[in-house]
Amino acid sequence: MKSNPINEATSQHVQIRPKRKNLLTNFSEYKYGILFALPWIIGLIIFYAIPLFSSIYFSFTTYSILQPGEFIGLQNYKDLFHDPLFWKSVYNTIYFTVFFVPLSIIFGVALAMMLNMKVKGMAVYRTIFFLPTLVPHVALAVLWMWLLNPGFGLVNGLLNTIGIEGPAWLGSETWSKPSLILMSLWGIGQAVVIYLAGLGDIPDDYYDAADVDGANWFQKTFHITLPLLTPVIFFNLVMGIIGAFQQFTLPYTLTQGQGTPANSLTFYVMYLYDNGFKFFKMGYASAMAWILFIIIMALTAVVFITSKRWVHYQGK
């Protein structure tokens, strides 16, 4: 039998009309959603998107806030690679990241495991260890400047009682960065809370089965706790790397922005801030910001790629 063209056209017309109706209905629904999200979208464009793309352009200019500047291409990037203080700030930041991030994970996990024990009054101990996180970095810097004072500081005073002559700490080029790492480790309470949440998410069935098999504490820790805690460790590793490369407030407060002694505490973001807001070399600072962005993105990508080998999720 031959098909009737009129019936085919009618059937196509019948199929198309509901689609138009659905599009109109969905548009009316999206309209109100977009309307309610509009303040956030406007804020995102004004305070994030426009500055983001502007900084890309400024990194190729001599823009200095007071003057529009001229387009100079890659000259800012070339000058950075010939700037000794730039490389010093890169070294200081990498040094801090390499030591602080692993130590923060080790001490954070160990502290969380201790605070996860079934002991009376554990909530009080958890609160005590979390309190340093609430201390502002300025107050933290003042406190540790007194504690690490080489003449009358409490730390050197305790070392002298056991016959050890304490170093100059913040006054020594060798000990300044280890001192900063020590201060930063004192405030890892926020990461500890996240580790505690991860420990609480591990089912007790795994430990009950391990007890039946006769596993000891070390075996349960390295074969159950740590593998199932790797998703939380992975999160804190990524956030720790990002935070370490953006270290600013504590060293800037400790040295009043000078990075002393001998620029041993001049970190990357400190030098970026000085170029942008002290020397008004905003184009130069924008170039530094994009180099930092590329470094952090590259390291984050490496962590994400390698995470498939060592991060274990429950049920997989």
Image (cartoon, rainbow, N blue to C red):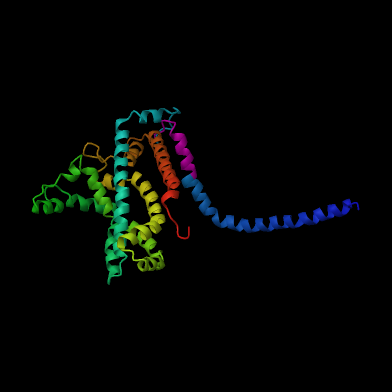
The relative height of residue 279 versus residue 4 in the rendered view (above or below) is above
Where does the magenta region start and end? 49-64
Please indicate whether residue 17 sits to the left or right of residue 235 in the image.
right
The relative height of residue 92 versus residue 113 in the rendered view (above or below) is above
The relative height of residue 280 versus residue 29 in the rendered view (above or below) is above
Q: Position of residue 23 (x, y in %)?
A: 69, 55
- Along the viewing direction, whichever of 131 and 284 lies nearer the viewer: 131
- Residue at the extreme bottom: 120
Q: Position of residue 175 (x, y in %)?
A: 20, 43
- Along the viewing direction, whichever of 141 and 8 lies nearer the viewer: 8
Please indicate whether residue 22 sits to the left or right of residue 103 in the image.
right
Residue 170 in sight in this render: yes
Please indicate whether residue 287 sits to the left or right of residue 96 in the image.
right
Q: How many marks?
A: 0
Residue 190 in sight in this render: no
Residue 55 is covered by the magenta coloring: yes
Residue at horizontal 29%, vertical 50%? 103
Residue 297 is covered by the magenta coloring: no
Q: Position of residue 142 (x, y in %)?
A: 22, 51
Residue at horizontal 30%, vertical 67%? 117
- Along the viewing direction, whichever of 10 and 305 lies nearer the viewer: 305
- Along the viewing direction, whichever of 230 and 91 lies nearer the viewer: 230
- Residue at the extreme right: 1
Quadrant housing residue 63 = top left
